[in-house]
Image (spheres, grey):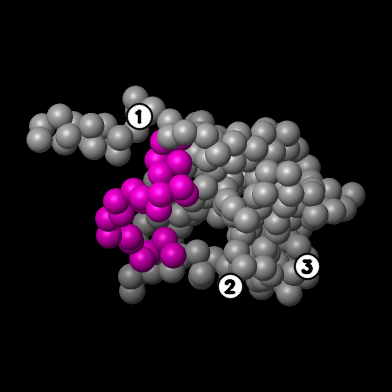
Amino acid sequence: MLRISPTTGLSLFRECPRCFWLHYNESVHRPRGIFPSLPGGMDLVIKKYFDKFRGKLPPEIEDKVEGKLLPDLELIEKWRNWRTGLEYVDKKLDATLFGALDECLVDDEGYYIPLDYKTKGSAPKDGDSEKYYQTQLDTYAFLLNHNGYKARDFAYLVYYFPKEVKKNGVVEFSVEPIRVSIDLKRAQKTFEDAVLLLQSSIPKTHSSCEYCLWIGNRLEFE
């Protein structure tokens, strides 16, 4: 059965259908440069930090987001692992949509709100959250809802970006939560469209994909 994630799967589908088709059908993956280790290290440190506030909120985002952190540590650790995380199985399409959440909030009415933290070099710009992470957040909410955890129609991205370096090399970070509206139907349609694309012939070169353009230019040169 085909398995698709929101990050390496649906986001790639939205960015370039041809690269997505080649990735899954022919195992032809985009070239990958040196992957920086700092974001991964920050992600692990932030997870451990958030775990200290189960059922509460870290002080830097208190009164800035709705709900409290999911109190069940065992459950959130399960959801964080792509092997044991949330899944949606479409037997008709013979495909599974799966994802691993960073974090999840629960409000007073028992609704679940996906939360994902991001580290970057500067403050987020208007529209960047929707541009780069809309599909990911839509999918997380869809997966929660499908598995019996009622999801709100919004999610949060919490950005950590450096502010200054203090004595003894201590780096102070600014923290900015961004609320993003989500659409469960859009998540399901994106997944279904992606699977149907894989069952069709290879798409044409995407005009705005730098990888497709590079291949085309190289072949033309040769």
Q: Is residue 214 part of the magenta span, yes or no?
A: no
The number of numbered discs placed on residues in the rendered structure image is 3
Label located before the other in sequence (2 or 1): 2
The residue drawn where x is 70% and y is 59% is 86
Taking the image as shown, residue 11 lies to the left or right of residue 98, namely left
Name the outermost residue toward the right.
Answer: 109
Residue 158 shows up from this direction: no
Name the outermost residue toward the left.
Answer: 222
Residue hosting label 3? 71
Q: For residue 212, which quarter of the picture?
A: top left
Q: Is residue 22 part of the magenta span, yes or no?
A: yes
Count neighbours of disc 1 (C-alpha within 10 A) and say few if under 14, some if 14 to 19, many if 20 or more: some
Distance Cα–Cα, label 2 vs label 1 = 43 Å
Give the amino acid type for the residue marked by disc 3 in the picture: Pro
Q: Position of residue 52 (x, y in %)?
A: 66, 73
The residue drawn where x is 43% and y is 68% is 41
Q: Is residue 161 above or below residue 53?
A: above
Distance Cα–Cα, label 3 vs label 2 = 14 Å
Residue hosting label 1? 205
Which of the two marks, 2 or 1, is nearer to us in this view? Answer: 1
Count neighbours of disc 2 (C-alpha within 10 A) and say few if under 14, some if 14 to 19, many if 20 or more: few
Q: Position of residue 16 (x, y in %)?
A: 43, 35
If the image is split into quadrants, where does the N terminus sit? bottom right
The residue drawn where x is 51% and y is 70% is 45
Count neighbours of disc 3 (C-alpha within 10 A) and say few if under 14, some if 14 to 19, many if 20 or more: some
The boundaries of the magenta stretch are 16-40
Which of the two marks, 3 or 1, is nearer to us in this view? Answer: 1
Label 1 sits on a secondary structure element that is loop
Residue in front for this viewpoint, 176 or 88? 88
The residue drawn where x is 50% and y is 64% is 43
